[in-house]
Image (spheres, rainbow, N blue to C red):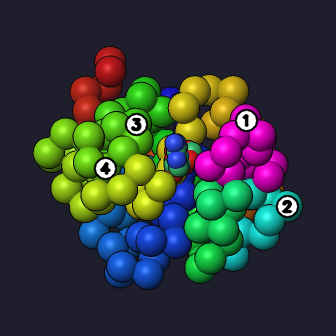
Amino acid sequence: MERTLILLKPDCVQRRLCGTILSRFEAKGLNIVALKLLQVTPELSKQHYAEHVAKPFYPGLEAFITGAPVVALVLEGLEAIRVVRDMLGATNGLKAAAGTIRGDFSSSRQMNLVHASDGPEAAAREIALYFQPSEICAYQPCLTPWLKADDE
Ligand code: CMP
């Protein structure tokens, strides 16, 4: 099982798309093990987007991500990091394939609705940025026997 950090970004909250997008993750069989609404501060933005802080687009990205609340969650599942990235589609909503979340709901490179960790190291770092260990509720979904075979 893998865990990945997801942010439903300010555009997602403002556009009332959180329920629609959460239901895609639930329908896929991913398990929500942590979830909260919060306001990203400039300090948290710089930590989260450390690799982008020096890039020309960073000031606009920080203004965007701090401009309204986000919903942060941790999803758990087999190959969850890759599976969620595939569900999101390409970074730029104009280039994301139809049928992906960004392909269906975003027409922007910056306002691409959802962030998801891009690898195991990023997932561990980002989960620790947004959640205390005590805020993560591991549980066995009763649907598990209907979502995958025992040996998967
Ligand atoms: P995300 O997956 O959260 O990771 C970094 C974010 O920066 C990305 O989604 C976009 O919202 C944003 N981003 C990436 N590239 C650009 C760019 N060239 N111009 C503006 N925003 C960008």
**As displayed, is residue 27 above or below residue 150?**
below
Q: Which residue is mark 3?
A: 85
User: Which image quadrant is residue 107 in?
Assistant: bottom left
In the picture provided, is 63 more to the left or to the right than 43? left
Between disc 3 and disc 2, whose residue precedes?
Answer: 2
Give percent across and percent down for residue 128. Answer: 77, 47
Q: Marks 3 and 1, Cα distance to the nearest angstrom?
A: 18 Å
Of the residues under marks 2 and 1, which one precedes in the sequence?
2
Which numbered disc, 3 or 2, marks the residue closer to the eye? 2
Q: Residue at x 67, y 33 (%)?
A: 122
Q: Which residue is mark 2?
A: 43
Residue 148 visible: yes
Closer to the chain start, of discs 4 and 2, is: 2
Residue holding disc 4: 93
Report helix, strand or loop for mark 4.
Answer: loop
Amino acid identity at mark 1? Glu
Q: Is residue 42 left or right of residue 114?
A: right
Which residue is rendered at x = 36% and y = 45% of the image?
A: 92
In reply to whether residue 99 is colored magenta, the answer given is: no
Q: Calculate the distance from the C-alpha at mark 2 to the C-alpha at mark 1.
A: 14 Å
Q: Quote the CA–CA distance across marks 4 and 2.
A: 27 Å
Q: Residues within 10 Å of mark 4 (few under 14, many from 20)?
A: many
Q: Report the magenta residues as a range.
A: 46-58
Residue 47: say if magenta.
yes
Quadrant position of the C terminus in the picture: top left
Which residue in the protein does label 1 denote? Answer: 51
What secondary structure is marked by label 2? helix
Give the image location of residue 120, x and y in percent.
62, 26
